[in-house]
Image (cartoon, helix red, strand yellow):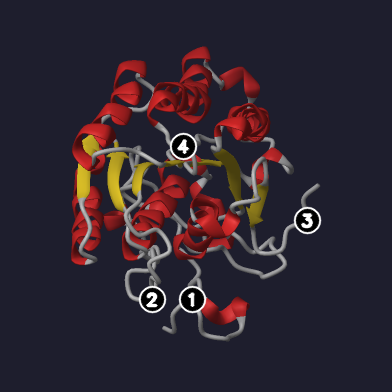
């Protein structure tokens, strides 16, 4: 497959074979995904756009986070990868790809829904990388529930802690360490604009991420710190097979987009690179939608 700079048909650039019905126990592994997701392992070509930068990536073991880790490293950044302990197999593979690019990869397993761990990630980055100037909050929890009556308070709370509270804890802890020029990139979703009836809690958190990011962008602008958002559409990751979607819906996953297919994690990485780099120096408070052409406000 050609790299991301080669002129080509975007519909055919990342072919998406119809996935079979499948399910995994949470949080799910890319190693057990059919077909495997494309993180840009064979295609992403860096150009030193993040040379010398120091990044913290949550959810860095698989899916979008893994693609961002590979891209950041090939652009010259060292990274701390946050992930759940159950995802160690995936995390080690991505860490090796970071090291193959000549950069430092620090493995930091834990659950961002735990405040102590989430805040500790900042200090891990500062101690192990010698500083921190990029935060990519990508880890997310998505569990479909057909009927609101079956959505427990505990599950609702865990989704908010993973998707929203962790962002707040990490950014608040990081502020004393972030220099002018630092970039914070949060992750929303098409669900913020077109919420699915089975994803009430998840969609609500993604709308909240848009709002908190726009408020923070204004607050932190005088400090020279930019805050932006990437909002993916349907992207093929283990999240979908580990309770994110009903298994019987997976063979049609992504077909509702104008491109007629799901996206691959590799297609998200350039958006994060752009927002992390000085190329986006006058961009803050923006939500960049990467969703195969689905209209958003």
Position of residue 288 measured from the top left corner of the image (x, y, whole percent): 65, 52
Work out whether 70 lies above or below 203: below
Question: CB atoms at circles 1 and 3 under 8 Å apart?
Answer: no
From mark 3 to mark 4, how far is it between C-alphas? 23 Å
- Dot 1, how many residues are within 10 Å of its Cα: few (below 14), some (14-19), or many (20+)? some
Q: What residue did someone put label 2 on?
A: 43
Position of residue 238 measured from the top left corner of the image (x, y, whole percent): 40, 50
Q: Is residue 134 left or right of residue 230?
A: left
Looking at the rendered structure, the secondary structure element under dot 1 is loop
- Dot 3, how many residues are within 10 Å of its Cα: few (below 14), some (14-19), or many (20+)? few
Looking at the rendered structure, the secondary structure element under dot 3 is loop
From mark 4 to mark 1, how far is it between C-alphas? 26 Å
From mark 1 to mark 2, how far is it between C-alphas? 7 Å
Q: Quadrant of the N terminus?
A: bottom left
At horizontal 33% and vertical 39% (from top left) the residue drawn is 25
Looking at the rendered structure, the secondary structure element under dot 2 is loop
Position of residue 286 measured from the top left corner of the image (x, y, whole percent): 67, 45
Q: What residue did someone put label 1 on?
A: 4
Q: Earlier in the sequence, mark 1 or mark 3?
A: 1
From mark 3 to mark 2, how far is it between C-alphas? 28 Å
From mark 4 to mark 2, how far is it between C-alphas? 25 Å
Q: Earlier in the sequence, mark 1 or mark 2?
A: 1
At horizontal 19% and vertical 38% (from top left) the residue drawn is 128
Viewer-side residue, 138 vs 72: 72
Q: What residue did someone put label 3 on?
A: 295
Q: What residue did someone put label 4 on?
A: 140
| Among the 4 quarters of the image, the one containing residue 12 | bottom right
């Amino acid at each position: 497959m050609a790299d991301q700079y080669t002129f080509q048909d975007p519909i055919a650039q990342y072919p998406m074979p119809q996935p079979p019905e499948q399910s995994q126990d949470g949080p799910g592994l890319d190693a057990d995904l059919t077909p495997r997701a494309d993180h840009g392992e064979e295609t992403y070509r860096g150009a030193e756009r993040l040379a010398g930068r120091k990044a913290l990536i949550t959810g860095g073991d698989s899916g979008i986070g893994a693609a961002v880790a590979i891209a950041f490293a090939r652009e010259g950044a060292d990274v701390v990868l946050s992930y759940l302990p159950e995802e160690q197999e995936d995390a080690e593979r991505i860490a090796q790809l970071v090291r193959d690019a000549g950069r430092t990869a620090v493995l930091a397993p834990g659950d961002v829904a735990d405040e102590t761990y989430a805040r500790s990630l900042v200090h891990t980055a500062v101690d192990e990388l010698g500083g921190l100037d990029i935060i990519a909050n990508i880890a997310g929890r998505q569990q479909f529930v057909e009927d609101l009556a079956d959505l427990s308070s505990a599950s609702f709370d865990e989704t908010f802690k993973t998707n929203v509270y962790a962002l707040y804890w990490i950014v608040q802890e990081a502020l004393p360490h972030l220099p002018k020029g630092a970039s914070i990139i949060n992750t929303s979703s098409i669900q913020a604009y077109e919420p699915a009836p089975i994803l009430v809690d998840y969609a609500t958190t993604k709308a909240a991420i848009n709002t908190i990011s726009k408020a923070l962008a204004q607050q932190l602008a005088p400090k020279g710190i930019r805050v932006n958002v990437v909002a993916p559409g349907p992207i093929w990751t283990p999240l979908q097979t580990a309770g994110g979607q009903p298994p019987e819906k997976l063979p049609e996953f992504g077909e509702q987009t104008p491109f007629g297919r799901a996206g691959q994690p590799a297609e998200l990485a350039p958006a994060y690179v752009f927002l992390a780099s000085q190329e986006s120096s006058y961009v803050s408070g923006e939500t960049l939608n990467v969703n195969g052409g689905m209209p958003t406000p």
